[in-house]
Amino acid sequence: RASRVARRDVQGSVNMDVASGQSSGRIVAELTEATKSFGEKTVIRNFSGTILRGDKVGLLGPNGAGKTTLLKLILGELEPDSGKIRRGTNLQVAYFDQMRDKLDLDATLEDFISPGSEWIEIGSQKKHVKSYLSDFLFSPARANSPVRSLSGGERNRLLLARLFARPANVLVLDEPTNSL
């Protein structure tokens, strides 16, 4: 318990370099009167909009308003009941899901970030995985700890570290500050 309290008080700077993927087409997604329902409940109604390469888009609204559903429509994880969605070419999506179901609780932090290797490549730069983890405020001593030992906020940082280590040209963050 004392070590958890001490970890909460640790101050530091986070260094988040993102591995960039190949260049995408100009259009990321174009929605034309897209509608999505679940049973009797219409979550998205006649939504139209275009997202272009380089755009920064924020979705705001109360719980249950359809933000995640709209993201999944844009990404192609869901299809609209009516309307049309055109997705761009050469999209490499890095998706930070609010459900956080991609965690292997038995893996060490080091293996979770770079399975089978002590090195990780970010863009063209090769970096030791312990050094990379320190960019996300994990001490080298914690690199061999199991993921299950992390708090909710630490798990989010670990997921972000893994997400940023993979080449992408579209970054989607669904409630990234949960548990922080």
Image (tube, rainbow, N blue to C red):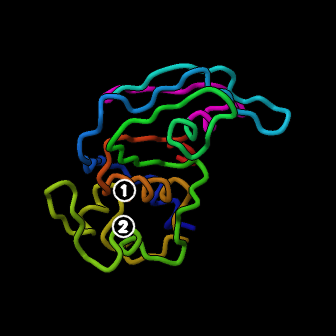
Position in image of residue 16 (x %, y %)? 29, 47
Quadrant (top left/top right/bottom left/bottom right) for the N terminus: bottom right
Residue 62 magenta = yes
Q: Give the residue type at disc 2.
A: Ile
Q: Secondary structure at mark 1?
A: helix
Position above or below: 57 against 74? above
Q: Is residue 149 above or below residue 124?
A: below
The answer to whether 79 appears left or right of 102 in the picture is right
What number is the disc on residue 16? none
Residue at 27% in and 69% down: 130
From the top left corner, tell me how far across and down residue 175 is, in percent.
55, 40
Quarter holding residue 109: bottom left
In the image, which residues are magenta? 53-70
Residue closest to the far right = 40
Q: CA distance from mark 1 to mark 2?
A: 7 Å
Mark 1 in CB contact with mark 2 (< 8 angstroms): yes
Q: Please tell me in which quadrant of the rendered image residue 41 appears.
A: top right
Is 58 magenta? The answer is yes
Q: Which residue is mark 2?
A: 113
Q: Residue at x 55, y 71 (%)?
A: 148
Residue ID for mark 1: 161
Counting residues from the start of the chain, the first of labels 1 and 2 encountered is 2
**Residue 146 vs residue 141: left or right?**
right
41 to the left or right of 97: right
